[in-house]
Image (spheres, coloured by chain):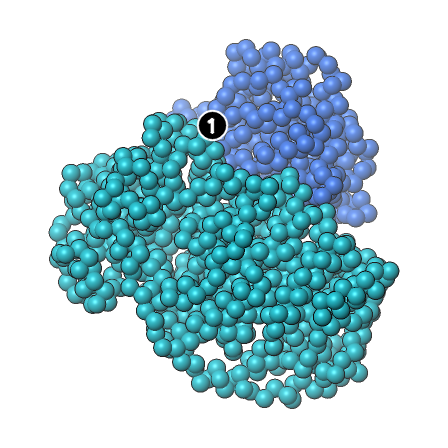
Chain colours: A blue, B cyan
Amino acid sequence: MKIGIVRFPGSNCDQDCHRAVDEGVGAEAVYLWHKSHDLEGCRAILLPGGFSYGDHLRAGAIARFSPIMREVIAFARDGGPVLGICNGFQILCEAGLLPGALVRNDSLRFRSYPVRVRVEQADTPFTSEYEEGDVLRMPIAHGEGQYVADRSAIEALESERRVIFRYVDELGQPTEEANPNGSARNIAGICDEGRRVVGLMPHPERVVSNLLGADGLGVFHSLIGSVRATGDGTATQALEAGDGPAAQAPETPATQAAEAAEASAP
Amino acid sequence: MSGSATRAPVIEITPELVADHGLAPDEYEQILEILGREPTFPELGVFSAMWSEHCGYKNSRPHLKTLPTEGPLVVQGPGENAGVIDAGDGWGVAFKIESHNHPSAVEPYQGAATGSGGILRDVFTMGARPIAILDSLHFGSLDSPRSRYLLDGVVRGVGDYGNCVGVPTVGGEAIFDPSYERNPIINVMCLGILRLEDLMRGKAEGVGNAVMAVGAKTGRDGIHGATFASEELDEGSDSRPQVQVGDPFTEKLLLEASLELIERDLLVGIQDMGAAGLTSSGAEMAARSGSGIDIDVALVPVREPGMTPYEILLSESQERMLLVAKPECESSVAEVLSKWDLEAAVVGRVTDDGFFRVRDGGEVVVEIPVQPLVNECPTYTREGVEDPEVRRLRALDIAEYSGPISDQEAAEALLTLLDSPSLASCRWIYEQYDTTVGTNTVVGPGSDAAVLRLADSGRGIAASLDCNGRYVYLEPRRGAKIAMAEAARNVACSGARPVAITNCLNFGNPLKAGTYYHFTEAVAGLGEGCRALSTPVTGGNVSFYNETPDGAVYPTPVIGMIGLLEHLDRVVPSCFLTPGSTVVLVGETGDELGASEYLAACHGVVGGAPPQIDLEEARRLVDFLVEAAERQLVLSAHDCAEGGLAVALAECSLGGPDGPLAVEAELRTEAPAAAALFGESQSRVVLSCDPVMVEEVVALAAERELPVSVIGSVGPPNGRFRLAAAGVQIDLELDRIHDVYRSALPGRMEKQAGLTT
């Protein structure tokens, strides 16, 4: 079973993700180059953290147009599990696979320290090894991690149980003090409607060993378990779709705007 | 864009032009002798840069030569892009420190960012993957809006650059003193790991091999940055055009591409185009190999049309490297660079005639013998004389401050010290740095030393940056020895054995006798420290002219110490973690308040002699700490430094990840109360251990001939901080000291409206 880790120019958590999959849970990790159109038979895709394309324009705004993202989007639409961590989460939002956006932290400063997040839902491919209510300790490291969306989108996330991780304090409560960046409703991670695409700002791949803390290991164990459970199901179909002609990317406002910009470029 | 560089009009070399290039008349005579003719304008620029203080070490070289540079673990000493030590099992650690003081004084964000960029390139050109950055920052008082502006910009600059490249910033120091008011000290150290078989050097060998410029295009920024760094900062001049602009995204691509080129064995040599750009990288690579180099500036990709050979040669545009490809490898090199969307151009060839030759299309514009250009920069030994004012301050009678104080005064003094930005929690700074990317950070900022994983070897690397400029100012030789001993002690507190140093020597104008005296005495002290602690110098940096019309900064020789930890799972934390554990003080507490933070912060006095330092004792303490960690005798170990025992104990109590723990301690000593609580006697460490281990800890200390006393115990969370000595007791609520300690920096930085630009 291969797990694909996309390398964009400027990705800098790619090696940490590789290690988490490889040494952390003993699965095969492969790098997928951003210029490629081939998911190489991977059964799940990780979009790692970093500063893809130097965060030029806006975090994730350019990575979303990388050749590989067409395949990732098609893979996700066919139910393949996709996890975006930090910059990966930003890319998923820019690509329209997840709703909302990640904007500058309310402190207007880069924030980096271990936070606590509560697992809100254990029915995604990345949280099935946890219990709902588990409080995990993992680092954040971001300048643009404030999750925002319009009121109806937030309500939909809540009512559809699509908030997957929430920042909490040592008592497990989502207090204002526990919110490192001003995110709406202390949201640290969410999933899509199909519950197969998950994005989060904290870094589970940095805490997968006894030496550095192991609270993130469950994310990767969950992934391996869920890919095994689906057998040759959705993931293979997605793979076939990915091998064929590039699927049409969903039309999002960002896509339309970019296309308009491209059209008007001299 | 590449094409023919703009033909510059022939410029007459006048004595004024020579002087403008920072070259003395006798230096110019030497140039005439080397060339056997008058230099061309570009040649004058080349000599000016290579013979600047920054590149040529004019005033420091004779003294630097006295420092020990060899040892059993040294694989690469000074003279390369970075030093390298053997870390065992085929692993090497490459590390170096660099200053970016002047650029940061002018433009703090870009100055600090490009400082980080340069030192990262120095490390990855050795074939090492950078795994950590540490920064030693010295600013003026945070009461001044300018200092707050500089701190804010520098922290953002260091952070944004390292965060984006994906190298964690894991430690360092932040010191605030009026002497640094307009000339901050911004030193950045980087360390990386490599397989020793991949060790790469800045060489230009093999006649006919292609010389390639890669990375960013060459622009008009930073021309004569090296010369700028070799002058005092004066009042009116706007030096912003001499500061470069960093692009960490390109740096990240360069890092990955360079490591891929080295791994695929496509290179003969590689070097950062840092200070003095193409000139220094080309000439130094040829000089190391005893070869020559022939470059055509018309082939160098440039950012704008109309650049002259002079400008292309001396540009300090960032994120550029010069490399020499192996024969038949040019196209593979180009392929790797293109994969990473980087530009590469063959700009010349290696020759064997010993000349640094530059053409502009067909015309030769520079032709200088490499060896004298690189290795015969004139050096000067001057006479240093101690400034009588320094002697007066050192002799100041401070006895009146050592004596009896009330409980109340002692408690207030501790609160004042914990509120002093130099001693307070640096959390506000390091929370802006990604400290854990790369998953190598076992111990991050806030401890005596940072500890990094050495790949999967099960072993660790410890690193610490230290310098107390006030000590060095008041007594340079002793101050430098203390910096060495403290850096070693910090590393050893984590359980690691100190093995080598890199240093960054920040001083004022060396042409002034008082500064020169400080410099020579400090270097002598460093040498003594290196020899006593068996920690040779593997490289470093000298930064002179840290001086404004208000005067020089405190002499600040920053020590970057590297240590090796045999068993990473036996790493010792610096703070108390276990209620009920016993607190032990190793070392002797004397009547030594001289040069202390207590005198400065509580009484506004800078004076008295710095504390005594016995390097033999310092070494025995290192041995003790390493063995105590190896035998797992202790639960924590923390250096007792600025602020004395009271501050060290408070830091142990407040530093835990799960909040503060109570402390109950009493020190029996002959020293008067203020000195006992706040004096900075050297070679002292606060330990905590399981009560059943006390006997063994005491026995081990005795074996190493170190004074040791059991002084108290660690209590539960939410208790009190109690420390008694010489009949005085400090008794404060934990919450209170915690608040003061953690809000000192954010309180000064976040309330400010006065960001001047």
The N terminus of chain A is located in which quarter? top right
Q: Is residue B702 left or right of residue B376?
A: right
The answer to whether residue B280 is seen in the rendering is: yes
Q: Is residue B143 placed above or below A204 in the rendered structure?
A: below
Q: Is residue A23 left or right of residue B658?
A: left
Q: Residues within 10 Å of mark 1 (few under 14, many from 20)?
A: some
Q: Is residue B516 left or right of residue B91?
A: left
Residue denoted by label 1 = A258
Which residue is at a point 64% across and 77% down the rendered structure image?
B598
What percent of the width, then of the height, locates residue B676?
71, 79
Badge 1: chain ID: A
- Residue type at the position of mark 1: Ala
Q: Nearer the viewer, residue B326 or B664?
A: B326
Q: Is residue B569 placed above or below B520 in the rendered structure?
A: above
Q: Nearer the viewer, residue B295 or B253?
A: B295
What percent of the width, then of the height, locates residue B62?
37, 66
The answer to whether residue B281 is seen in the rendering is: no
Q: Nearer the viewer, residue B593 or A132?
A: B593
What percent of the width, then of the height, locates residue B244?
38, 51
Q: Nearer the viewer, residue B525 or B309?
A: B525
Which residue is at a point 60% across and 62% down the rendered structure image?
B488
Q: Splitting the image into 4 quarters, where does residue B738 fall? A: bottom right
What percent of the width, then of the height, locates residue A259?
46, 24
Which residue is at a point 53% across and 22% down the rendered structure image?
A68
Q: Secondary structure at mark 1?
A: helix
